[in-house]
Image: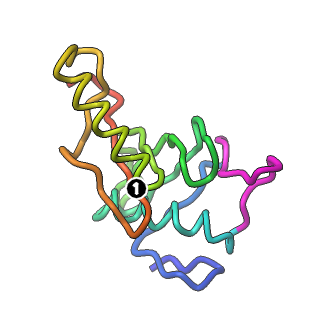
Amino acid sequence: MHDTTGGIKLKFNIQVDPFGQSLIDEQGFPLGENDPRKILVEQMLEKLYEGCESLFYSVTSAVDPLNCLLQVQLYDKLGGVLEATMCKVGTAKRIEVENQTFDKLEAFCPENVPHRVFEKPVYLDSMGGMVLKLTSR
């Protein structure tokens, strides 16, 4: 098990991509290992990618550290690269609104909407998230 310096045990290895953008605070500085916002986002990733061996993530865009779009690269037990995905993480309310928007767009023009891996968002306390495929359906 991976143990962050904050004492929160994660079931698998979750790291910021060393070549990507990390979660940042309001002043633009990377969040520390003990920052509760980083811990919450990584717990959400753990729930979304349950059963994964290892993953690296990088911020693609962010309103703030708790509402962001992440690029996620998964790895198997042997270190082999698995399919990359995008992951939207945010407050439960924001993710629910986003999910409703996806539902409406899919009804109107399904070919132009990113494919959601799960039919519904996944929630953890006050957070929500959804995994989007990067490839075509």
x then y, percent, for residue 107: 16, 21
x then y, percent, for residue 101: 31, 31
The answer to which quarter of the image holds residue 46 is: bottom left
| Element carrying mark 1 | helix
Q: Which residues are magenta?
A: 19-32
Secondary structure mostly seen in the magenta stretch: loop
Q: Residue at x 33, y 47 (%)?
A: 96
**Residue 71 included in the magenta stretch of the image:** no
**Residue 29 included in the magenta stretch of the image:** yes
Foreground residue among 30 and 125: 125
Residue 22 to residue 40: above or below: above
Q: Residues within 10 Å of mark 1 (few under 14, many from 20)?
A: some
Residue labelled with disc 1 = 92
Q: Residue at x 51, y 43 (%)?
A: 70
Residue type indicated by callout 1: Ala
Q: Residue at x 47, y 55 (%)?
A: 91
Q: Horizontally, is 6 left or right of 29 in the view? A: left
Q: Quadrant of the N terminus?
A: bottom left
Foreground residue among 78 and 18: 18
